[in-house]
Image (cartoon, helix red, strand yellow):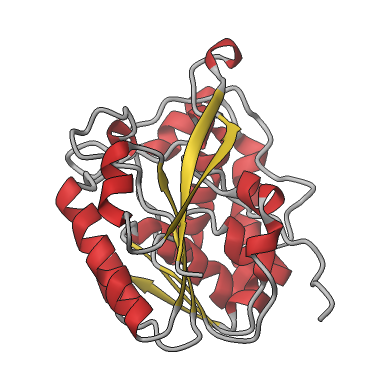
Amino acid sequence: MERPEVLAPFLKWAGGKRWFVHARPDLLWFHEERYIEPFMGSGAVYFHLQPSRAQLSDANRDLIATYQAIKSDWRRVHSELSGYADRHSAENYYLARGVRCRDIYSEAARFIYLNRTCWNGLYRVNRKGEFNVPIGTKTNVLLPSDDFERIARLLDSADLYHRDFEVAIDDAMEDDFLFVDPPYTVKHNLNGFLKYNENIFSWDDQVRLRDALIRADARGARVLMTNADHESIRELYDGIFWLEPITRNSVLAGTGGTRGRVTELLIRNW
């Protein structure tokens, strides 16, 4: 079947999978079954595959609300985002960071604006649930790659949920394609990624995730997951699924000089 025209994610996300769709396209063949993603993030794999049926979930309420707003009325979101582009400055960044908006469309535009102009596209909130990432060096609020109209058309065929990952995975049935990209928590929490999570994804959550995937596999779902290439993760899945290390460039660091090559783990049931 002919591949759809490339559709790029409009958000940056810590742990995002833009690199993955280019590194391992052999694992992402186009299919007509339902696509399920319980950790949506920037949706790089979803936008790459552009499935005709999808269930998209995330524990980040603001993220899912942003997708819902674009699906409902992308023009209003784009109009509000254009206003942020016209007003962008350090002063306006911190002003936007500290307020909530009047409706889901302006709030979605605020979310995208902060994502594009904060440090490294990081999403982080304090204990009060307030976004607290400092301003970054990027100043482009509107991007040449923006195609909210096509994104909205694609999302028309997707169900969007703010919910726990286990609930999403338990919806996966025979022949569904389940792509899973959790926070990379390891058993002793020494991998340095936890500080980027709003709600800590604990080792107990990793165990709960494995058990949910075993159930999905038993129902006949096709499972593909990326996770930390760590001994504790390997032990968790050893003898259950296929394990394969994959190397990528590290992109989450304070300066380019501190970035290097890191290994992640692919886990799949075929």
Coordinates of residue 153 in the picture (x, y in percent): 67, 78
| Residue 99 placement (x, y as % from top left) | 35, 43
Please tell me whether residue 90 is drawn above or below residue 223 in the rendered image: above
Q: Eyeballing the image, is 110 above or below 59? A: above
In percent of width and height, residue 88 lies at 60, 33
Q: Answer yes or no: is residue 136 visible.
A: yes
Location of the N terminus by quadrant is bottom right
Q: Nearer the viewer, residue 185 or 233?
A: 233
* Residue that appears at 49% across and 17% down: 254
Decide if residue 163 is in sight here. no
Q: Position of residue 14 (x, y in %)?
A: 47, 40
Tag count: 0
At 66% from the left and 81% from the top, the residue drawn is 31
| Residue farthest toward the top in the current orientation of the protein | 257
Q: Residue at x 42, y 85 (%)?
A: 220
Give the image quarter of residue 250: top right
Q: Nearer the viewer, residue 65 or 255?
A: 255
Task: Locate residue 67 relative to residue 26 in the image: left or right.
Answer: left
Q: Is residue 23 above or below residue 209?
A: above
- Left or right of 210: which side holds 76? right
Closer to the camera, 189 or 195?
Answer: 189
Does 156 sit above or below residue 225?
Answer: below
